[in-house]
Amino acid sequence: MKDMTVSTERVLELIAAYGAEPGAWPEDERAAAAEWVANSPDLFAAALEEARALDQMLLNEQVPEPSSQLSESILTAAPMPKPAARGVLGGLSTLIFPQGVRWPAGAALASLMMGLVGGYAYASTGAGYDQADLAYYAAFGVENGEDWLGTE
Amino acid sequence: MSGISELDQITRAAAGDRAAQAALVNRNMPIVFRVAYRMLQDRAEAEDVTQETFLRAWKKLPDWQPKAKFSTWACTVALNLCRDRLRKKKPVLMDELPERVDTGLRPEESLASQQALQGIEAKIADLPDRQREALTLCALEGMTNIEAAAAMDVSVRALESLLARARRALRAGLGAELAGER
């Protein structure tokens, strides 16, 4: 639609389709069509009056408001913020340790250290322990631990 | 939201930004509801269509292509949903449809105004579906001819033809009421 296509017939078509208000006419034809009307007002007076009356009635048309819960319902279904991508293991870790893995890792390290220290202490007192065992066996009349254990 | 483009708003809404989502709904929900209401003439059904339209929007947003305004896209979806519902209703004769009870109009409105509004509303409701769509988008919601034609998936010339026929039918139907406006 270019300005050069504007004619009396075309302006009447615009009024019939879009009404009397030039603001409602297609933007690319608006200025030329309005000028055409201004140059020959009598040609369009009847069409404009008729269209204006209908425009006024359409302005008075009312539609009920939607319920107040509608916006809320719509927003409830809206997408939630996505957590930063951390892979499958990262997701599993978050699921198991929601406060992070620092404390469980520290506890595991402490357990390991206690095990090592305890094991070393046990090994270093091994001889004394054997003497106590022999005394225990002697109390039951057994000469050595191997008899008691039935490994002879 | 004046400093934020629609595309920015959509991008943020897709990422879960609640403020952007609320702004998108506040800006576009009313027009979608009004279009649906004019097509279906039923508040509850119009709300269902509006909700379904936004459910589809939430799914669409991550892949949004700014080919059209969000409102144009939303009206296209809403119109399609309305057409589906109207198609299912077609076997029911107009005479058998119940009177509309809840128009949502405020009680303080005068009786004369009520009658006039019911007059124009009733005449719009009686228009053929495609003419009602064209009139709703262009004359009542202020879409440009290009936007309305895109939403209806018709040419601009076809849109103009539908608009002219709709206005002619309204003028014929309103008759005396319209003469009183002059």
Image (tube, helix red, strand yellow):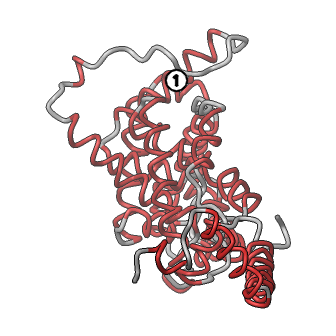
Task: Answer yes or no: is residue B94 visible.
Answer: yes
Q: Residue, x 70% and y 50% (percent of image)?
A: B26
The answer to whether B61 is drawn above or below residue B44 in the figure is: below
**Image-based side of B170 in relation to A113, left or right:** left
Q: Nearer the viewer, residue B148 or A26?
A: B148
Q: Residue, x 47% and y 53% (percent of image)?
A: B53
**Amino acid of disc 1:** Glu
Q: How many marks?
A: 1
**Quarter assignment of residue A131:** bottom right
Residue placed furthest toward the left? B91
Instruction: Quickly name the residue at label 1.
Output: B177
Task: Answer yes or no: is residue A34 visible.
Answer: no
Question: Which subunit holds the residue at mark 1?
Answer: B
Residue placed furthest toward the right? B3
Q: Nearer the viewer, residue B158 or B82?
A: B82
Q: Nearer the viewer, residue B104 or A144?
A: A144
Label 1 secondary element: helix
- Rendering coords of residue B144 (x, y %): 56, 65
**Quarter assignment of residue A66:** top right
Label 1 Cα neighbours within 10 Å, binned few <14 / some 14-19 / many ≥20: some
- Rendering coords of residue A88 (x, y %): 52, 80
Q: Residue, x 37% and y 14% (percent of image)?
A: B99
The answer to whether B99 is drawn above or below residue A47 in the figure is: above
- Rendering coords of residue A49 (x, y %): 59, 44
The answer to whether B75 is drawn above or below residue A9 in the figure is: above
Q: Quadrant of the C terminus of chain A?
A: bottom left
**Image-based side of B159 in relation to B179, left or right:** left
**Quarter assignment of residue A71:** top right
- Rendering coords of residue A141 (x, y %): 56, 66
